[in-house]
Image (cartoon, rainbow, N blue to C red):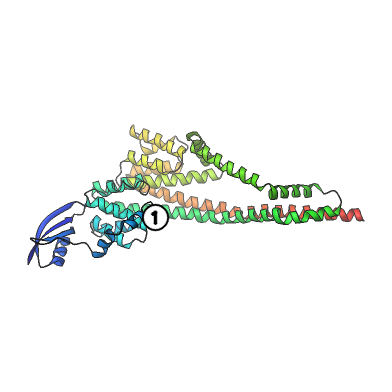
């Protein structure tokens, strides 16, 4: 039997030391883990220090600085952050200290950017910082919602439950984003093919028919002259079209970058017929889900409203949420604070009132978000189902115009000959 002095980390990531009597290094590491600590260093009394971390982790933490420079500057994807949150929640819920859980994630991740970030988090945890403070070094990857929920979980001693709830939130956000992308992909492809087909007709097919029309010797009908003029402009003045499009895009982005321009555009987005209702439901779904998740995680309501307002992605909705927050600060209930603002949908106001009366505001808000997401899905399916016949109709109309413009000179020439 020998005595070992150990340096370890407890469940909160703080460093602890002590002396235990064991047979060897393996037994000493097992005994320290049995105390609920993660061993960092084991030193036989009167002997040489021995690191207790797994060799694979040691190799990971001593990678060449060239690789560190190569990975630095990258940014983890949303999917990587989602997997990181879910796996970290499961590991902490299983009883692993945060430092050990990060070591496991460090070994499993296949992303250099993610590995660099987890390594930085682990260094801060080993230095005695709480997880919420360590996350503050990565504001682009971890928004205020993330860090505030982690902080609330640490204060309440419910970090595993809060991280699980946060992982659920991120999963639903990812599903929503994937659904929107999937719904817009088919219309985008269809419109792109239609534009390319029209461009091909105007730049390659129509110019070759111009000589044929000249050989007929008769005055061309108005539709044919219009088609030839349009074809000539597209074929020879394409750079003008490109400049106009580039200028319009640049001007729009510059205008939207201003405070007044952004507010006008955001107001148009939620008030335009048909699409405005959809945009408002999407903003309200994100607001209610974010607010419900924060409240369920133990974040105070005023702070939750601040974070939720910045998460909706619409300055007009953000301003309305800020006004509601001020009313709540003055003592009003959330439902009454939103009641007289047309930005908030009646469903959101009514469900908030029910949640306040029953003491289940957070679950009611999340349920409201689920209902709104369902309505958004149905609305997007209906809108995208209208795109295909509309594009086909426009394309058919243009092709009909082209055919008519080509046939009219031929019919006119035959009439003159007769």
Q: Position of residue 59 (x, y in %)?
A: 27, 62
Q: Is residue 303 above or below residue 124?
A: above
Q: Residues within 10 Å of mark 1 (few under 14, many from 20)?
A: some
Q: Which residue is mark 1?
A: 171
Q: Name which residue lies at 52% across and 55% down.
A: 183
Residue at 15% across / 56% down in the picture?
Answer: 7
Asked which quadrant contains residue 299, the reply is top left
Extreme-right residue of the structure = 418
Label 1 residue SS: helix
Instruction: Classify 308 as above or below 329.
Output: below
Looking at the rendering, in which quadrant would you find the N terminus?
A: bottom left
Left or right position of 359 against 281: left
Position of residue 406 in the picture relative to residue 335 (left or right): right
- Residue 402: in sight, yes or no? yes
Q: Quadrant of the C terminus?
A: bottom right
Is 26 located above or below residue 393 in the figure? below
Percent across and percent down for residue 198 are 67, 54
Compared across the picture, whether 342 is left or right of 72 comes to right
Can residue 115 be seen here?
no
* Image coords of residue 247 (percent x, y): 58, 41
């Amino acid at each position: 039997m020998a005595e070992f002095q150990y340096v370890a980390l407890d469940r909160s990531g703080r460093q602890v030391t002590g002396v235990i009597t064991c047979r060897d290094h393996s037994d000493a590491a097992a005994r320290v883990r049995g105390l609920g600590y993660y061993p960092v260093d084991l030193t036989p009394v009167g002997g040489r220090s021995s690191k207790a971390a797994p060799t694979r982790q040691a190799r990971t933490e001593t990678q060449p600085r060239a690789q560190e420079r190569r990975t630095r500057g990258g940014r983890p994807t949303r999917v990587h952050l989602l997997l990181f949150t879910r796996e970290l929640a499961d590991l902490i819920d299983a009883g692993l200290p945060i430092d050990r859980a990060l070591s496991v994630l460090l070994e499993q991740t296949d992303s250099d950017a993610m590995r660099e970030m987890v390594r930085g988090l682990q260094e801060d945890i080993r230095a005695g910082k709480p997880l919420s403070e360590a996350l503050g070094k990565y504001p682009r990857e971890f928004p205020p919602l993330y860090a505030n929920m982690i902080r609330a979980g640490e204060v309440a001693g419910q970090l595993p439950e809060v991280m699980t709830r946060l992982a659920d939130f991120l999963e639903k956000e990812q599903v929503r984003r994937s659904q929107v992308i999937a719904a817009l992909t088919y219309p985008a492809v269809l419109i792109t093919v239609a534009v390319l087909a029209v461009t091909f007709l105007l730049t390659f097919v129509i110019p070759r028919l111009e000589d044929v029309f000249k050989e007929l010797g008769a005055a061309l009908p108005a539709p044919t002259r219009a088609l030839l003029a349009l074809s000539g402009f597209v074929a020879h003045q394409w750079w003008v079209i490109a400049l106009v499009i580039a200028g319009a895009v640049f001007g729009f982005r510059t205008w939207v970058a201003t405070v007044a321009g952004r507010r006008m555009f955001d107001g148009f987005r939620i008030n335009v017929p048909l699409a405005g209702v959809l945009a408002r439901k999407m903003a309200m779904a994100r607001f209610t889900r974010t607010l419900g998740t924060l409240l369920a995680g133990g974040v105070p309501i005023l702070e939750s409203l601040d974070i939720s307002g910045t998460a909706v992605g619409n300055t007009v909705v953000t301003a309305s949420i800020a006004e509601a927050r001020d009313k709540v600060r003055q003592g009003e209930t959330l439902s009454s604070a939103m009641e007289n603002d047309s930005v908030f949908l009646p469903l959101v106001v009514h469900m908030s009132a029910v949640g306040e009366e029953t003491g289940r505001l957070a679950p009611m808000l999340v349920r409201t978000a689920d209902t709104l997401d369902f309505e958004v899905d149905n609305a997007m399916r209906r809108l995208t189902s209208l795109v295909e016949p509309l594009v086909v109709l426009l394309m058919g109309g243009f092709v009909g115009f082209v055919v008519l413009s080509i046939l009219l000179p031929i019919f006119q020439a035959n009439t003159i000959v007769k």
